[in-house]
Image (cartoon, helix red, strand yellow):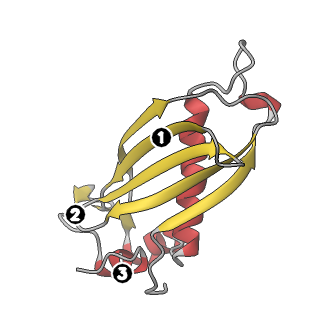
Amino acid sequence: MNSGKNTTCEVNLTVPFHDLDPLQMVWHGNYIKYFDVARSALFNQAGIDLFHYFNRTSTLFPVTKTSVKFISSLRYLDEFKCTATVVQAQYKIVLDFRISLADGKKICAKGRSEQVAVKFPQMEILFEIPEDIRKALGHPR
């Protein structure tokens, strides 16, 4: 894991047909999928492989809360970007998300998620995000 400030990551995506609802707009649940694509890219950019981290430490990082504010619907073949930004990583990992059209002129959705560290198999919530994860996300003590 690197110790640089990897606090923001942006991914470029295109709306596929199978993400549409009967009104030919992106179904609301798919916005959370887009958030997760950006979250995964942010962790990868920070050098964090959660699968290997779990195998090495028996620590999971489940999402415990997600919210979305829908502003303007995405439609078939829209090119858009989803940006994930680390807001905090001390006691929980809080990420803000922003989905906008690729040209950046129209914001389509905003969101936030929270993750905690959990020791497995005890399923005990840790009261702090492990130091190596905090540093990799650019939030040392």
Q: Which numbered disc, 2 or 1, marks the residue that appears first in the sequence?
A: 2
User: Is label 3 in a helix, a strand or a loop?
Assistant: helix
Hey, what amino acid is under mark 2? Tyr
Task: Say what amino acid the circle numbered 1 marks.
Answer: Lys
Residue at the disc numbered 2? 91
Mark 1 or mark 3, whichever is nearer to me: 1
What percent of the width, then of the height, locates residue 81? 65, 50
Q: Residue at x 28, y 69 (%)?
A: 129
Outermost top residue: 22
Q: Crowdedness of circle 3 by 10 Å Cα count: few (<14), some, many (20+)?
A: many
CA separation in Å, label 2 and label 3:
13 Å
Query: Dot 2, how many residues are within 10 Å of its Cα: few (below 14), some (14-19), or many (20+)?
Result: some
Residue under pointer 3: 135
Residue that appears at 53% across and 36% down: 109
> Which residue is most to the left?
127
Which quadrant of the figure contains the C terminus? bottom left
